Image (cartoon, rainbow, N blue to C red):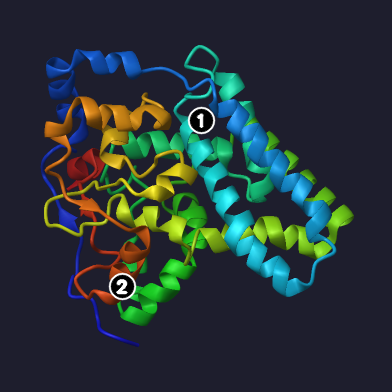
């Protein structure tokens, strides 16, 4: 089973998350960063191109041997679908069409969702924006593992299994710990996605469906691009709760590796986040960072000091009143 993790609880913080105060300080010193705010006009074209590539690929995939289907799903299909997931992340901040066109952003997100096979685009927005606003909140930040996850997957082998099952936990955790009433758009997102899944299976068979759905699941588990799930907020250095990565995988993930910059300025599109660091290097160059997402996954699994408990957590205000 491997070594048991050394932590037995989360790292509790009784101060506010660091990004709001740092944002104010940076803008006071570098007001020119405001010029980076706004939508990315190229985002919609990237989404169109990636979705088209995935759907057209099915005409080739359906006739390939299963070994090739698996390899292509892991190496190409999964990577592209993960890129689309991060396009949806950008869209959740209204960075495709701007804040004046919220429905256009929502429908582009639903369109980007189609090759991924798992209907999540609309519901992701609500949970993700609360992750930003209430980072570390024990109720509202559903990015944090549950206590049950931390207790069950507390060995080297357990963390390996937990990493492999990341899609399951990311999908089920919010529904179980913080359920919300589905909106009409969420229902539409689900119906359209299930219809698309049926058509893919009907016309391209199990191979086509595995290329899309299986690729999505594979690329959220033990896959290089999935390293960002761990690298972003797991506490590799005591007291630091957000980490950036400036390596080449940012080219296929809409610069999600610039994560300190993203949390400081969530209305700056990923394409302009490197400029934030360039304009205010004194706020970022000294912070701990990750050099490799693959190494992040390896260290998370093998290092007994790191595990699901290695997150900074804050008491929920409502819970404090009840105590």
User: Which of pointers 1 and 2 lies earlier in the amino acid sequence?
Assistant: 1
Looking at the image, which residue sits at the far right? 203
Whether residue 181 is visible to the viewer of this picture, yes or no, is no
How many numbered discs, if any? 2
Left or right for 207, reference 125: right
Q: Position of residue 22 (x, y in %)?
A: 15, 29
Q: Residue at x 19, y 65 (%)?
A: 9
Q: Residue at x 36, y 36 (%)?
A: 130
Q: Gap in Å between the C-alphas at discs 1 and 2? A: 34 Å
Q: Nearer the viewer, mark 1 or mark 2?
A: 1
Q: Residue at x 12, y 18 (%)?
A: 29
Q: Quadrant of residue 162?
A: bottom left
- Vertically, is 183 above or below 78? above
- Vertically, is 276 above or below 299? above
Q: Residue at x 15, y 45 (%)?
A: 287
Whether residue 320 is visible to the viewer of this picture, yes or no, is yes
Residue situated in front as seen by the camera: 251 or 143 = 251
Q: Position of residue 280 (x, y in %)?
A: 18, 27
What quarter of the picture does the N terminus occupy? Answer: bottom left
Residue situated in front as seen by the camera: 166 or 173 = 166
Residue situated in front as seen by the camera: 90 or 9 = 90
Mark 2 lies on residue: 151
Q: Position of residue 89 (x, y in %)?
A: 47, 37
Left or right for 244, reference 252: left
Mark 1 lies on residue: 91
């Amino acid at each position: 089973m491997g070594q048991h993790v050394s932590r037995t609880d989360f790292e509790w913080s009784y101060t506010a998350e660091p990004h709001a105060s740092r944002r104010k300080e940076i803008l006071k010193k570098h007001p020119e960063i405001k010029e980076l705010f706004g939508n990315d006009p190229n985002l919609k074209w990237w989404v169109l191109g990636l979705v088209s590539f995935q759907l057209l690929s099915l005409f080739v995939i359906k006739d390939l041997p299963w070994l090739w289907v698996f390899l292509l799903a892991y190496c190409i299909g999964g990577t592209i679908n993960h890129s689309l997931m991060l396009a949806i992340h950008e869209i959740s901040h209204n960075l495709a069409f701007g804040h004046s066109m919220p429905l256009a952003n929502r429908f582009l997100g639903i369109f980007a969702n189609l090759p991924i096979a798992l209907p999540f685009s609309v519901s992701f927005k609500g949970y993700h924006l609360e992750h930003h606003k209430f980072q570390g909140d024990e109720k509202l930040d559903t990015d944090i593992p549950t206590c049950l996850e931390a207790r069950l997957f507390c060995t080297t082998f357990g963390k390996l299994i937990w990493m492999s099952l990341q899609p399951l936990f990311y999908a089920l955790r919010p529904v179980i710990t913080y359920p919300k009433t589905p909106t009409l758009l969420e229902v539409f997102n689900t119906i359209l996605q299930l219809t698309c899944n049926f058509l893919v299976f009907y016309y391209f068979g199990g191979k086509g469906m595995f290329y899309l759905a299986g690729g999505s699941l594979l690329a959220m588990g033990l896959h290089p691009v999935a390293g960002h799930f761990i690298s972003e907020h797991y506490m590799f250095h005591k007291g630091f709760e957000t980490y950036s990565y400036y390596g080449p995988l940012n080219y296929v993930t809409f610069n999600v590796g610039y994560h300190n910059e993203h949390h400081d300025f969530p209305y700056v599109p990923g394409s302009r986040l490197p400029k934030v660091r360039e304009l205010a290097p004194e706020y970022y160059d000294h912070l701990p960072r990750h050099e490799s997402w693959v190494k992040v996954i390896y260290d998370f699994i093998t290092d007994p000091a790191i595990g699901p408990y290695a997150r900074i957590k804050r008491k929920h205000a409502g819970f404090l009143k009840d105590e």
